[in-house]
Amino acid sequence: MRRSATALLVILAAGVVILLSSIFVVDERQKALVLQFGQIRQVREEPGLYFKLPLIQEVVYYDDRILSLDTETIEVTPADDRRLVVDAFARYRIADVVRFRQAVGVGGIAAAEDRLGAILNAQIREVLGADQVTSDVILSAERGNLMVRIRDGAQREAANLGLAIVDVRLKQTNLPIQNLEATFARMRAEREREAADEIARGNEAAQRVRALADRTVMETISEAEREAQITRGEADAEAAAIFAEAFSADPEFFEFYRSLQAYERTLRGTNSTMVLTPDAAFFQYLYAGPALSGSGSAAAAEGGAAGGDAASGEAGEEAAAGVAPSGLAPSEPPEAGAGPAAQP
């Protein structure tokens, strides 16, 4: 009896083990293959509970999510022979799990990523090294179209692995380290040349503005001087007309007034010296007053201009108006024996 119970327990335990080993679960993130002696017997892509033959069949799970792959950094040479260092990343998923198993075997995801990386690198070199694709195109808005071409080209080859490539992106596109300094130097030279051109254009514009301003100033000054000369001439003419009209009204007073101006200019200061004869006409108004005739006044002006030596001649030219000298009375002539010298 005891042996029967033990055997029953063993049978139950074996049954439980066999039952559990024949059940497998596929969740929504996975795909499963049921293999029997290495051959594919079942493909389970939908989530759920499934059965298999215990002991002789095994289940291999594959990730059904979108996976990521970073490619190795490679150098490419665009059409302008300007080498670039490029690396990319791809998003992919297992589209056909049977073909994937047949292509990579027991290597799984690791073997598939090695082969997919080689495919992507080959496509990157092919697309970026094609005709009409320069480094400027790679770094411009056309970059998106280039990545689409890389993705489409890689997809055709990745389909043989049972993979579907969702997207390919270029992470960085840089110059090699050994070319950076030369490139930076060329960029600096280009910027300096552009700056020099801008400065030259600015100086040229400044010269034009200054020349125009100088011309405007000269024209304005010339016009103002011309108008000033015209105004001054008209004023001088009007003043001369007024003087002529005023002096013609009383010529005798005019001669007397001009004699006074001559005295004022001739006898200015304390060191003026004039050598005149006692009967010189220059001082006739000091002797006789303003009641003299017009001819006497004209003779006085003549005598003042011609009398004396060089010193007295200069004083006579300035003698347009003045005051009486301190040594003479305004109405008395000098004594006969006093001599020709007279000092103020």
Image (cartoon, rainbow, N blue to C red):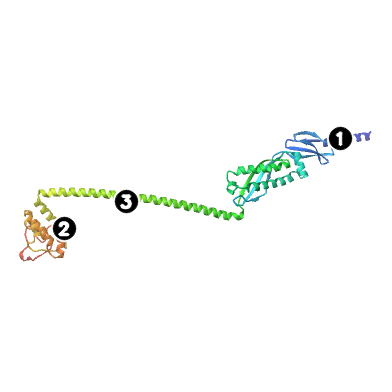
User: Measuring 16% from the left and 50% from the top, which residue is drawn there?
Assistant: 240
Which quarter shows the N terminus? top right
Q: Is residue 295 above or below residue 4?
A: below
Say if residue 321 shows up in the picture: no
| Near-viewer residue (162 or 339) | 162
Compared across the picture, whether 297 is left or right of 127 comes to left
* Residue reaching furthest to the right: 1
Instruction: Using the rendered view, name the quadrant where residue 277 is placed.
Output: bottom left
Please state the horizontal and vertical placement of residue 342, each as a whole percent of the image: 11, 63
Query: How many numbered badges does the structure rendering display?
Result: 3
The residue carrying mark 3 is 218
Q: In the image, 119: left or right of 292? A: right
Closer to the observer: label 3 or label 1?
A: 3
Residue 257 pos. (x, y %) = 12, 53
- Tell me which label, 3 or 1, sits earlier in the chain: 1
Tag 1 residue: 15
Cα separation, mark 2 vs mark 1, equals 153 Å
The quarter of the picture where the C terminus appears is bottom left
Q: Amino acid at mark 2?
A: Arg
Give whichever of discs 2 and 1 has the lower sequence position: 1
**Label 2 crowding class (10 Å Cα cut-off): few <14, some 14-19, many 20+?**
some
Q: Which residue is most to the left?
A: 336
Measured as percent of width and height from the top left, residue 179 is found at: 60, 55
The x and y percentages for residue 163 are 71, 41
Helix, strand or loop at mark 1: helix
Disc 1 marks a residue whose amino acid type is Gly
Q: Earlier in the sequence, mark 3 or mark 2?
A: 3
Q: Nearer the viewer, residue 342 or 209?
A: 209
Residue at the spot of label 2: 265
C-alpha separation, residue under disc 3 versus residue under disc 1: 119 Å
What kind of residue is marked 3?
Answer: Met
SS under mark 3: helix
